[in-house]
Image: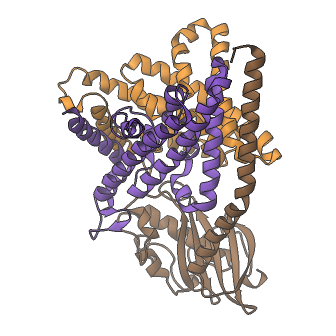
Chain colours: A purple, B orange, C brown
Amino acid sequence: MKKLNIILSGIVKNNPTFVLLLGMCPTLGTTTSALNGAGMGAATMAVLVLSNVVISMVKNLIPSKVRIPAYIVIIAAFVTIVELCMRAYLPDLYKTLGVFIPLIVVNCIILGRAEGFAAKNGVVDSALDGVGIGLGFTLSLTVVGAVREILGSGAIFGHKFITGDGMLIFVLAPGAFLVLGYLMVLFNKLTSK
Amino acid sequence: MEIVLIIIGAILVNNVVFAQFLGICPFLGVSNKVSTSLGMGAAVVFVTTIAAVVAYLLQYYVLVPLGITYMQTIVFILVIASLVQMVELVIKKVSPVLYQALGIFLPLITTNCAVLGVAILLVQKEFDLLESVVFAFATAVGFALALVIFAGIRERLELENVPKALKGTPIALVVAGILAMAFMGFSGLV
Amino acid sequence: MKNTLLNMVLVLGAITLLASAGVGYVYKVTEEPIKLASQAAVMAALAEVLPPFDSTSVSEIAVDDIPVVVNTATQDGEVVGYAVETATKNGFSGEIRLMVGFDAQLRVVGVKVLQHAETPGLGDKMTEEGNPLFASVRDKNLGEMNLSVAKDGGDVDALTAATITSRAWVDAVGRAFRALGGSVDGSTGATSNVKSTEL
């Protein structure tokens, strides 16, 4: 039960987007559609789980003064690995997400969880934390992407359900801020009860 | 002419915050007061410009000749992290006044994705050294501009009666959305 | 571990080394698939804008200082068409890259947008099937029409509310045609006289 709680807390109580307010750049930049949001979330989750596992394994070997640079190297290595794999096997998604894939390195979620969770917990728990936070992030990005896609292009996961155009502003840059802002209001309302 | 286009494009048309969504964390985090946002903006301009020069030299004189461009992300982030530390030390020694003004913001810059983003973008766009420096400088000025405008609005917002559910980040995001709309007016300028 | 200088240097060095080795290994493994993926993307674009073909040859030239790649497609040794990778810097935001397919008589067969950053819902309509831009040039020899948008007195119907994008599209398509040695009405600055037979 405790293990399940680690995962669940990442999705709701410690939701990286709506509660911790981390990783805002990809949240705004890659959510022009539900599928792009999901893809970005999945890529981030892969890096998060891998780096959490490795960092929790080597945490006792690293002198405390150089731990941050050490974590950054580990994270950057996994980001590059994920990037190379995406270029090889998912070239279209890689092209859409563009510069945001290498920028996973500076996504505060990853370093935050490395420092805040993996550095203090065992391998299994750290992996589960990575899965939970990763799922929370993926879910948030997918929801933001879905709302923008529905309002902006009248489609969901690429399937158009209205003819003609949606409200363009939601696909454009301002829509990202507006949708995220109002979804946050909704999230606060729902969880404050 | 190219240079002027790069400057206008980077500051106004493709504003790093409102159009490219880079550096959102400090944008939301350090924008409560105009005075602190000015400090942060100046620090970012400083570091981004230097980082761009270093990134350019590394890319074309180390990574490309060695054929290891796939190590770009690792090398760039390490360089930026150590650069920030170095800049901090140098400023502390050379100009205590400047250190007082920028000091507390410097460590925060490592996690500002705009810095790494600019380094990666200038390689992707195949700029030469001069264009890279101009692009980095202008992008960072765009960031500072966005930050200061936003801080000015948030200072006023503090005094307003905002509905409870919207308080804090949500209203900030809505404001940013409206600002982004205003910046869209610049598109087509270049 | 203790914070001695030796420890710190050793650990950071070891981690960097291991990380580089890991990344290097993955790079070696993915090198081939990445190459295949980008080739597949080019082939897919070629197949989309060309009549059926069995082999292609490539040549690169510059038209107005913009690099243009000409793929000559042959079927059983006979030229069946040309796919020209062309670009323009006149777009609304950033460069637009197109693949323009011509048949052997230099009539436009297909146009595929390879890269663009035009406004979603307005300029990016040029990527949709059956858009007015492509409909205006389809199956036509560009030398026999006035290749500019209707607003400028030409024969090409522009996209609604996206005149700049439309002009840029026309510019890129015209460049592709000039790369094949054709000359477009009203065009200036053609620096290339490459004959199609030389390709």
Which one is nearer the viewer's eye here, A46 or A3?
A: A3
**Picture quadrant of residue C122:** bottom left
Residue B64 seen in render: yes
Above or below, comparing residue A93 to residue B115 in the picture: below
Identify the residue at the far right of this view.
B65
Residue A169: x and y in percent read 32, 52
Q: Is residue B24 above or below residue A183?
A: above
Horizontally, residue A121 falls left or right of residue B124, namely left
The image position of residue A142, as x and y in percent, is: 38, 51
Seen at 37% across and 19% down, the residue is B33
Residue at x 82% of width, y 45% of height: B66
Residue C121 rendering spot, x and y as whole percentages: 37, 62
Q: Residue at x 73, y 20 (%)?
A: C8
Residue C187 shows in this picture: no
How many numbered discs sit on the rendered protein? 0
Looking at the rendering, in which quadrant would you find the N terminus of chain B? top right
Depth order, front residue of B139/C40: C40
Q: Which image quadrant for residue B90?
A: top right
What x and y, as percent, mark residue A35?
Answer: 42, 58
Vertical position of residue A146 compared to residue B170: above or below: below
Query: Does B69 sit left or right of A18 as displayed?
Result: right
